[in-house]
Amino acid sequence: MSELNKMPREEGMDHSVSLLREGYMFIPNRRQSLQSDVFETRLLGQKAICMGGKEAAEIFYDHDKFKRAGAAPKRVQQTLFGEKGVQSLDGKVHLHRKNMFMSLMSEVAIKRFVEMNRDEWKKAVDTWLGMDDVILYEEAKKLLCKTACKWAGVPLSSEGLDNRVGELASLFESPSAIGPEHWKGRHNRNQAEKWIGELVEQVREGEILPDEQAALYVISMHKDLEGKLLNTEVAAVEVINILRPIVAIAIYINFTALALHQFPEQKEKLASADDEFMQMFIQEVRRFYPFFPFAAARVKEDFEWKDYTFKKETLTLLDLYGTNHDPGLWDNPSVFNPERFKEQEDSLKFSLIPQGGGSYHDGHRCPGEWITIEAMKVCVDFLVNRISYQIPDQDLSYSLVSIPSIPKSQIKIERIKRK
């Protein structure tokens, strides 16, 4: 390969510390400075390729080019994902496990989730009316945890709620942390898997009988390609892969409230808007504000793309945040504008990728995206149409270094009243 076709490369021994210091902007900063949507760097002591943009997303989600096995760092497996879950699988094994998750996302099941979520919002509001103020992020985690467990068929006592919320939230709050917070995340991963693992065994022994359409039952009784039940630890990981992402929607609820506050003209539109505009508003919240910074994979076999060579087993990161703010894809990406989504839902497979890109059915795009959008619709309905509240002076800024990013004050609201 000629010198001209060598991949742009960031000089230096290792840039893991820079990644921690720059967070969501690590890849976008280098895409800009190197004037390339693909470049080579070193992370965690190994060569890594970083890339962003629609074309990069299309190649990243090509099953013949990339695999997920061995891509997630150990510290992420020990907190966010768990080990041997669907995110780490490839090929027929992945497709078989993914089909199990897809079976949980039927139209009827999602409608049931919405009803349960709306009910939990109503109960939460009843409580908030008697409180001087509410920290929306903390309250959202609680109501989402209750919704997730009820929908998944997971028994949850009111006495154990705070502990379970803390365990599940810690899984997505701690992966990028170092020191005590990371160890707390690992401890909570162990506790959560122990809790769910015991429930899986009870389902299999007939000691508890969740609805046969619920995630706890479906995953507990799921058989692999060899006709065997998943081992208890893996089944627990997969049930948590239902519960954890739903609790994580609390991040988006915080950013939804922030958007309504920062862009009051949008709140006025939503008050009289149809479902189409609400969908556009929610998609813009998901595009505009940070959620996951990047996704990881490894090169499956040597291949060439854009005259660059991708070597087998090379760690590769796809820039999710940067792609959602790519000026080549989005007109004025730093401007909050829901109207940009008018009549372009079908073209977003590799451009709007806050929860990954590609196909739901045979790829690695998160099917929980549907649940996320529906939960955000319920949130918007309550914050716009069902309650009035005030946001007192507070620090509403959010960091693009901290992962995940959440408004500093976690959105304190007060003087809550029903409309």
Image (tube, rainbow, N blue to C red):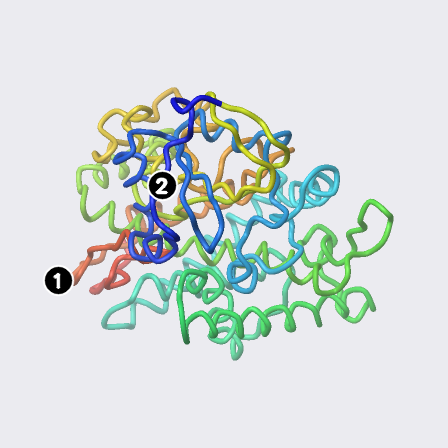
Which residue: 74% across, 38% down?
A: 92
Whether residue 313 is situated above or below residue 351 in the rendered picture:
below
Q: Quadrant of residue 93?
A: top right
Res 139 → quadrant? bottom left
Q: Going by the picture, which residue comes out furthest to the bottom?
A: 159
Measured as percent of width and height from the top left, residue 187 is found at 53, 75
Q: Nearer the viewer, residue 189 or 260?
A: 189
- 346 and 180: which is toward the camera: 180
- Of 299 and 266, nearer the camera is 299
Q: What residue is rendered at 40% in x and 40% in y?
A: 320
Task: Using the image, determine if residue 285 lies above or below residue 137.
Answer: above
| Three-letter amino acid code of the residue under disc 1 | Asp
**Mark 1 nearby-residue class (10 Å; few <14, some 14–19, many ≥20):** few
Q: Amino acid at mark 2?
A: Tyr
- Please determine whether, in this image, residue 414 is positioned above or below residue 42: below
Front disc: 2 or 1: 2
Q: Residue at x 46, y 55 (%)?
A: 44
- Above or below, 186 against 212 in this view is below
Q: Position of residue 142 (x, y in %)?
A: 44, 66
Q: Is residue 49 left or right of residue 211?
A: left
Instruction: Return the residue at label 2.
Output: 321
The label on residue 404 is none
Report the side of 331 relative to 57 (left or right): left
Please, what secondary structure does the residue beneath circle 1 have? Answer: loop
Q: Quadrant of residue 354?
A: top left
Q: Indicate which disc, 2 or 1, sits on the residue closer to the N terminus.
A: 2
C-alpha gap between disc 2 and disc 1: 28 Å
Q: Is residue 380 left or right of residue 76?
A: left
Which residue is disc 1 drawn over? 393
Secondary structure of residue under mark 2: helix
Expressed as whole percent of the image width and height from the top left, the position of residue 338 reads 29, 31
The image position of residue 50, as x and y in percent, is 42, 39
